Amino acid sequence: MNRLTRILLSLLAFAGLGLHFSAALAQGAASRPITLVVPYPPGGTADILARAIGQKLGERLKQTVIVDNKPGAGTAIGSRFVAEAAPDGHTLLLGTVSSHAINPAMTKVGYDPIRDFAVVAPLVSIPFVLVTRADSPYQKLADVIAAAKQKPQTLGYASAGPGTSNHLAGEMFASATGTQLMHVPYRGSAPALADVMAGHVPLMFDLQATAAPNIRQGKLRALAVSALERSALLPDVPTMAESGLPGFEVSAWFALLAPAKVPAEALKRLETEMAAVMQAPDMALRMRELGGTPDRRSAAAFSAYMKDEAKKYADVVKAAGLSP
């Protein structure tokens, strides 16, 4: 074997070792678990949704997806954790209207809800329904508006607390109708809804998933849903637009997000697999069980929608005097 042959064989062996090493690295990256951060405690809608999509996404990627609940600071703790995470596609966020529109408008969250994140996939939107006690004098939305205009700041509506989505739904409604309502905050949606059913507070914007059973049982009357189209869960209830408020839309939306600088290849793979996850019939059924509609928009279209939502809530928060 001459010297040239030995050099060529050495180069080939080295190249083979390099290829093997690259393959090992790729395999190691694929075997690393993905952490899906939920900025809420376990048990709520966001947590249920995260565990459902995490299982399906993990099956498609052949990777473990770990749901990590990081509640606190009105979603800011978990969201900031993901914004500051290594942008390698292994840390994701279950983002919501609260984490990316409401909370940033009301306080200093330590992250930019638009610039610091990339949209992997929109997931679902769950509209609100304006409800009142079944035997209340309000038969339709026009009755509420008339009463609010007749006696400003006396018609009360309950919420899960200051700055929550159903609080701001009421603020948007007041702005859209040119009325002044009285906000009655509670520590959570459950006690707020209980007092509406008891007749202590006349109105509440509640998520339709939790309101629907009480509506069917005759404990609540539904006046209007806050989506642009009628809800499959409450098909007989008119929309706000049908009731005289064109363009009125308030929903609790959810999306899968990644740190902003995640490589394009990794983001594209996640987008592709999540599209398949969301098109599965059992996932569509799960979304309907949560009272929502699967969001079929592209990641780019949803990014534009997030910007619009951030501005909308910033304007509402400022008008309501809730700005930091």
Image (cartoon, rainbow, N blue to C red):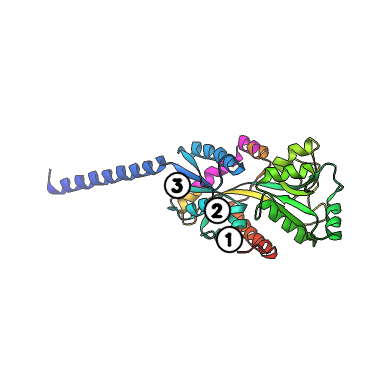
Does residue 33 lie above or below 142 as drawn?
above
Decide which of 289, 217 is in the foreground and name it.
Answer: 217
Q: Is residue 224 left or right of residue 165?
A: right
Separation (CA) of disc 1 from disc 3: 28 Å
Secondary structure of the residue carrying tag 2 is helix
The residue to which callout 2 is attached is: 73
Query: How would you classify the magenta stretch by its main secondary structure?
Result: helix
Residue type, mark 3 in image: His
Q: Residue at x 69, y 43 (%)?
A: 191
The residue to which callout 3 is attached is: 90
Decide which of 27, 308 is in the foreground and name it.
Answer: 308
Quarter of the picture containing the N terminus is top left
Residue type, mark 1 in image: Thr
Question: What segment carries the magenta color?
Answer: 269-285
The residue to which callout 1 is attached is: 107
Decide which of 179, 20 is in the foreground and name it.
Answer: 179
